[in-house]
């Protein structure tokens, strides 16, 4: 795959990205968290988009937001 910048992965590997997102949503649903935290801006966007699409209540925050 080589080096891929944040956010490019979901564009370049849409199908694989979608499968990963489905697994992430299942994991989030299985947990009982109100907030999902990530240090990756691309992941933050993908998580927020999928949670909104599925009408899930969890909030997605960047690591910097949490530490602030």
Image: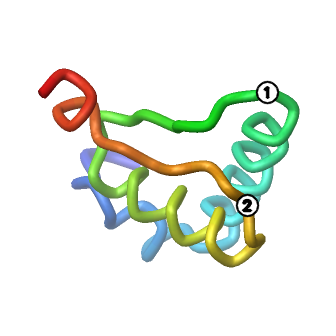
Q: Is residue 28 left or right of residue 48?
A: right
**Tag on residue 56?**
2
Q: Is residue 53 left or right of residue 3?
A: right
- Which residue sits furthest left? 68
Image coordinates of residue 18 in percent, x first then y, are 69, 65
Quadrant location of residue 19?
bottom right
The reply to whether the C-beta atoms of the residues labelled 2 and 1 are less than 8 Å apart is: no
Quadrant location of residue 13?
bottom right
Q: Is residue 13 left or right of residue 57?
A: left
Q: CA distance from mark 2 to mark 1?
A: 13 Å
How many residues crowd around disc 1 within 10 Å: few (fewer than 14), some, or many (20 or more)? Answer: few
**Tag on residue 49?**
none
Q: Which residue is rendered at x = 22% and y = 54% of the image?
A: 5
Image coordinates of residue 43 in percent, x first then y, are 42, 51
Depth order, front residue of 57/48? 57
Q: Is residue 67 above or below residue 16?
A: above
Q: Which residue is mark 1?
A: 31
Depth order, front residue of 36/22? 36
Q: Which residue is rendered at x = 53% and y = 37% of the image?
A: 35
Q: Is residue 9 left or right of residue 36?
A: left
How many residues crowd around disc 2 within 10 Å: few (fewer than 14), some, or many (20 or more)? Answer: some
Image coordinates of residue 52 in percent, x first then y, are 62, 72
Q: SS at mark 2?
A: loop
Q: Which residue is rendered at x = 29% and y = 41% of the image?
A: 62
Q: Is residue 60 above or below residue 14?
A: above
Q: SS at mark 1?
A: loop
Q: Which residue is rendered at x = 61% and y = 37% of the image?
A: 34
């Amino acid at each position: 795959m080589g080096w891929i910048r944040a956010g490019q992965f979901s564009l370049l590997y849409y199908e694989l990205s979608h499968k990963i997102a489905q697994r992430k949503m299942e994991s989030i649903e299985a947990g009982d968290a109100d907030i999902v935290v990530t240090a990756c801006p691309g992941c933050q966007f993908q998580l927020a988009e999928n949670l909104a699409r599925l009408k899930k209540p969890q909030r997605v925050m960047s690591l910097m937001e949490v530490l602030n």
